[in-house]
Image (spheres, helix red, strand yellow):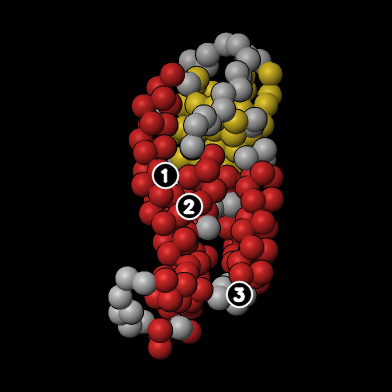
Amino acid sequence: MEEKGYTQTNHLIGLAPLVLFLSSYLPLFILIVVRQVYANSTYLSWGGFNVDALCCMVKYFGMSLFCFGLSVFGIVGLIIVFRNLQHRVESGHTYRIIEVSSMNDEPLAYIATYIIPIMFEDYSNLIDCTTIICIFYVIYRLYIRSKLIIVNPILSLKCSIYSVRYIDGGIQRQGVLISHDNDILENDQAKMYNVGHQLFYGYKR
């Protein structure tokens, strides 16, 4: 039985948008760490606790340490966010899906657009590192104001992403549904919890 009424727009709060953003760049962070450590492997020796050793570490491995920290924060945060969503989805609404199409190929565009060009920068250069961080900040501001959450290869490993059209109180609406179900079809009933403008998390009933 479909629930009547109109979809209310909720929003991811706190650090949730940030951890989703960081998790989407996890493959890039790993590549940066591997590439920088391999390129500067000759500097991987204990230099003691002194200013010169600290400067050497920051210069040749600073970006790697930074990316490693962001990766850990993103992974732990992503686990917490989806645990919270699994509890909140029960307060969502049940809708009948009238049209559905897969969006699981969206992360492929992400790989070509963001990972490949950025991974070949020189991360031992302060100017290049500052430039990359500024680019990340601009992308993050765009990310939290859009449905770029779906362009997330880590998310795609565990979930399927659908473009759906559904019935809400007699009105046809459309949105993007993130679900652990791999077989949502037309005329299925789906429990959907709104997490942003036209963005939902849910499951097939």
Which residue is at a point 49% across and 32% down the rendered structure image?
Answer: 14
Measure the alpha-carbon separation of dots 1 and 2: 7 Å
Q: Where is residue 10 in the image (x, y as percent from the top left)?
A: 57, 24
Secondary structure found at label 3: loop
Report if the CB atoms under discs 2 and 3 are less than 8 Å apart: no
Q: Where is residue 44 in the image (x, y as percent from the top left)?
A: 36, 82
Measure the alpha-carbon separation of dots 2 and 3: 25 Å
What residue does disc 3 label? Answer: 125
Q: How crowded is mark 2: few (under 14 residues within 10 Å), some or many (20 or more)?
A: many
Report if the CB atoms under discs 1 and 2 are less than 8 Å apart: yes
Would residue 107 be found to the left or right of residue 55 on screen? right
Residue 147, by quadrant, is top right
What residue does disc 1 label? Answer: 78
Would residue 118 be found to the left or right of residue 15 on screen? right
Using the image, tell me which numbered label, if any, was put on residue 23.
2
Which residue is at a point 65% across and 70% down the rendered structure image?
Answer: 128
Using the image, tell me which numbered label, if any, was put on residue 31.
none
Amino acid identity at mark 1: Leu
**Total labels drawn:** 3
Secondary structure found at label 1: helix
Amino acid identity at mark 2: Ser
Which residue is at a point 40% across and 88% down the rendered structure image?
Answer: 42
Which of labels 1 and 3 is toward the front? 3
